[in-house]
Image (tube, rainbow, N blue to C red):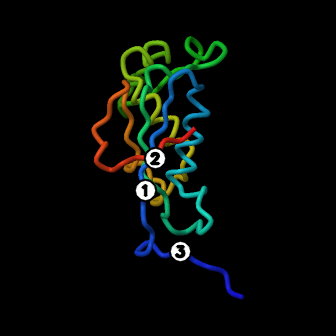
Amino acid sequence: MSTFMAKKETVSRKWYVIDAAGKPLGKTAVAAANILRGKHRPEFTPHVDCGEFVIIINASKAVLTGKKLDQKFYRRHSGYIGGLKEESYRHLMANRPELAMTLAVKGMLPHNSIGDKSITRLKVFAGENHNHQAQQPIAVD
């Protein structure tokens, strides 16, 4: 008996929706990363992009446990001397919760071309509404 290897041409992609309201940011990001990567499928193949589409709603209602709101920072650098910018997660979750969720999921994906393709299938919305009802997404617990 030979091992089944999935091919990217034969992969059919479904849409899933995850509600982040009241759930920890990290646990929601883990669930999304596993679906984006395709690890929930029985035909998962590590070197093939066989993941699905993920919609995360209510990103603004996700919670950060402990003192992460004040002690965790989002840092970026312009490349110039003194170009470090940082903002606390309290400010980030208040103003751009979609970015906070996207960064959490992106950090859990592989840092290669498969991860780059996978993150494009993530759609994050701060509120309850999303514009992908036509894809008939499946709700994830």
Q: Quadrant of residue 83?
A: top left
Q: Disc 2 vs disc 1: Cβ atoms closer than 8 Å?
A: yes
The answer for how far apart the CA atoms under marks 2 and 1 are is 8 Å
**Residue corresponding to mark 1:** 14
Residue pictured at 39% horizontal, 50% vertical:
121
**Residue corresponding to mark 2:** 138
Residue pictured at 64% horizontal, 12% vertical:
67
Q: Quadrant of residue 84?
A: top left
Q: Amino acid at mark 1?
A: Lys
Q: Amino acid at mark 3?
A: Ala
Which is nearer the eye, 124 or 47? 124
Instruction: Tell me the SS state at disc 3.
Output: loop
Measuring from the top left, give residue 64's x and y in whole percent. Answer: 58, 20
Instruction: Tell me the SS state at disc 1.
Output: loop
Q: Which comes before the other along the chain, label 3 or label 1?
A: 3
The label number, if any, that marks residue 6 in the structure image: 3
